[in-house]
Amino acid sequence: MAKEVQMSIKMESELRDQFMGLAASKHQPAAQIIRDLMRLYIENNETPNALTAETIRKCRRGEEVFSATSAEDLFKQLGI
């Protein structure tokens, strides 16, 4: 099991009170919510992220690949 450490965060008291109140009303430990948010933040900022990785895989398979003679041609093909 990973070693647990403590972390301090500075925030406005109103923000803390709102967060703690909402966590309590949902019967969720505030620390677990923070850990979940941290994991989500890491996942969303991985290089490459899940969407980029899937796009690379599709490109390698030749899926959803467009050839265009100009930006205007590409936009037309993409419908934008």
Image: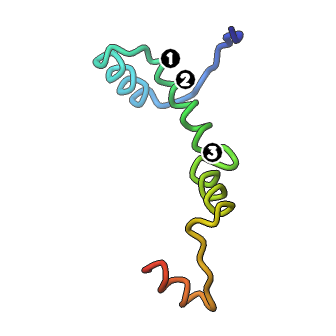
Q: Residue at 55% x, 68% y: name it.
A: 64
Q: Residues within 10 Å of mark 2 (few under 14, many from 20)?
A: few
User: If the image is split into quadrants, where does the N terminus sit?
Assistant: top right
**Residue drawn where x is 57% and y is 28% of the image:** 10
18 w.r.t. 46: above or below: above
Residue 56 vertical position relative to residue 66 in the rendered view, above or below: above
The kind of residue on which mark 3 rests is: Asn
Which residue occupies 43% across, 14% down? Answer: 29
Q: Amino acid at mark 1?
A: Ala
* Circle 1 SS class: helix
Quarter of the picture holding the C terminus: bottom left
Left or right of 57 on screen, residue 72: left
Q: Nearer the viewer, mark 3 or mark 1?
A: 3
* Residue beneath disc 2: 35
Of pointers 2 and 3, the one earlier in the residue sequence: 2
**Amino acid at dot 2:** Arg
Residue farthest left in this picture: 25
Per the image, the residue denoted by label 3 is 45
**Are there few (<14), some (14-19), or many (20+) residues within 10 Å of tag 1?**
few
Question: Considering the numbered disc 3 on the image, is that residue within a helix, a strand or a loop?
Answer: loop
The image position of residue 42, as x and y in percent, is 62, 37
Tell me the CA gap for discs 2 and 3: 15 Å
Gap in angstroms between the C-alphas marked 3 and 1: 21 Å
Residue underneath mark 1: 31
Position in image of residue 75 (x %, y %): 51, 83
Q: Are marks 1 and 2 in contact (CB under 8 Å)?
A: yes
Query: Is the residue 63 above or below the residue 51 in the image?
Result: below
Q: Secondary structure at mark 2?
A: helix
Please name whichever residue, 60 or 22, is drawn nearer the observer in this view of the structure. Answer: 60
Establish if 40 lies above or below 31. below
